[in-house]
Image (spheres, rainbow, N blue to C red):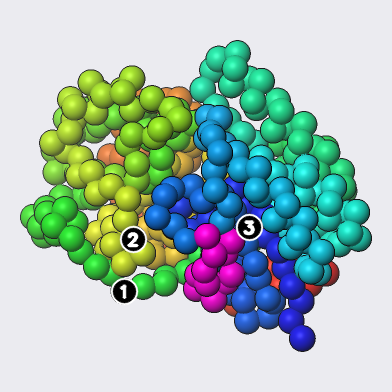
Amino acid sequence: MKKKILIVSDFYLPHWTGIVKSVAYMNDSMKKWFDITVLCTKHKSGLLKEEIVDGVRVIRSPVLFSISRAKISLLMLPTIIRNISSSDIVFVNSPSVYITFTAVWAKLFGKKLFVFHQGDLTLPKGFGNIIVERLFDLSSVISCLLADKVFCATKDYAEHSRVLSRFMNKFETLPILARKTAKPSFNTKLKSVEKLKRQGYVIFGFAGRFVEEKGFDLLLQAIPDALKKNPKIHFIFAGDLNVSYEDFFEKNRSSYEAVQKHITNAGLLDEKLLEGFYHLVDAIIIPSRSDCFPTVQVEGMIRGKPVIVTDIPGARVPVKEIGFGIIIPPDDVAAISKAIISTSKQKEELQKQYENVKNYFNFKRDEQIVKKHLAG
């Protein structure tokens, strides 16, 4: 009989973020060995209260109100208690509003408790946001104290984390089981980029939420200088420009509009269109100010796309260890521009490192590591 794993996550599919996709990748592999239930919030209207998503049972609780990016649902609390009692293992996808509540009840029921910490909460500057960050830190620390194991994608991030650095005695690396899940598809916007590619343009992709920690404003500032040195460069963005809880795009609208004709805004993409995005790009740019382990980096690398990434804990690890890309200083516009030009000139040289990528992201090996962690 399969062991039953209960996953508590503030968000789940079809929510479009790395913190969701990393768990979805894990579930897609682990469902053949475990019976998996995900508890999450109903982050938008129209979603079913309960359904099977790719072989995983998903239960969504209605949202009462939001605080910044946090979704508050009082109905999550009894749902968590009810499902913990019938589970063998409780797995919290952190950061989470419900992490401490889940951890306490998991231990009261005598269940194994695992915390998968995907980054310290990082919000824009401001007194209110500092309070929110500290509350999340406190709840995460309490939960990690109660946990049997704490996970993160890299030891590098864990050692620098405000939360995980206190718990290295129970820390384990949990690989991200990213893989190709669909054949590439191309809508009108992607086809326009495909046309530019045939004309000899070098295509750079960036993806995610347009929020301060992702550093896309720095990329916008770097684009004009890069174009002066090579006008046959084009950029494609996959993600959400207008994030409801952070007006960072509006603050940088003028920078965006100044280079808008050199950027194709593809928006939020489904799996098939996202495969099309990766098929078209020559390299991925991750100019983040903080980023635990961006899934776009793994997804790009396993598809043969080198990465330009900032020298920050966690995100820098793959490029640092296998050389498939360029590491640049944080908050350095000139360095981003220089890296774009270097990458456009060294495409063939960088591709020689792709064999290292296949060894580093070894799906079958990593799948067994994740299975062992969850079973143990």
2 or 1: mark nearer the eye: 2
- At numbered mark 1, what does the secondary structure look like: helix, strand or loop? loop
Q: Main secondary structure of the magenta part?
A: strand
Residue annotated with mark 2: 270
- Residue drawn at 76 percent across, 76 percent down: 3
Residue 22 visible in image: no
Looking at the image, do the residues carrying marks 2 and 1 touch, with CB atoms under 8 Å apart? no
- Residue drawn at 45 percent across, 35 percent down: 214
Q: Nearer the viewer, residue 270 or 320?
A: 270
Question: Which residues make up the magenta segment?
Answer: 49-59
Q: Nearer the viewer, residue 213 or 14?
A: 14
Question: Which x, y percent locates residue 185?
Answer: 24, 68
C-alpha distance separating marks 1 and 3: 29 Å
* In the displayed structure image, the side of residue 7 where residue 256 appears, left or right: left
Name the image quarter holding the C terminus: bottom right
Residue 69 visible in image: yes
Q: How packed is label 1: few (under 14 Cα within 10 Å), some, or many (20 or more)?
A: few
- Label drawn at residue 39: 3
Q: Callout 1, which amino acid? A: Lys
- At numbered mark 3, what does the secondary structure look like: helix, strand or loop? strand
Q: Earlier in the sequence, mark 2 or mark 1?
A: 1
Residue annotated with mark 1: 183
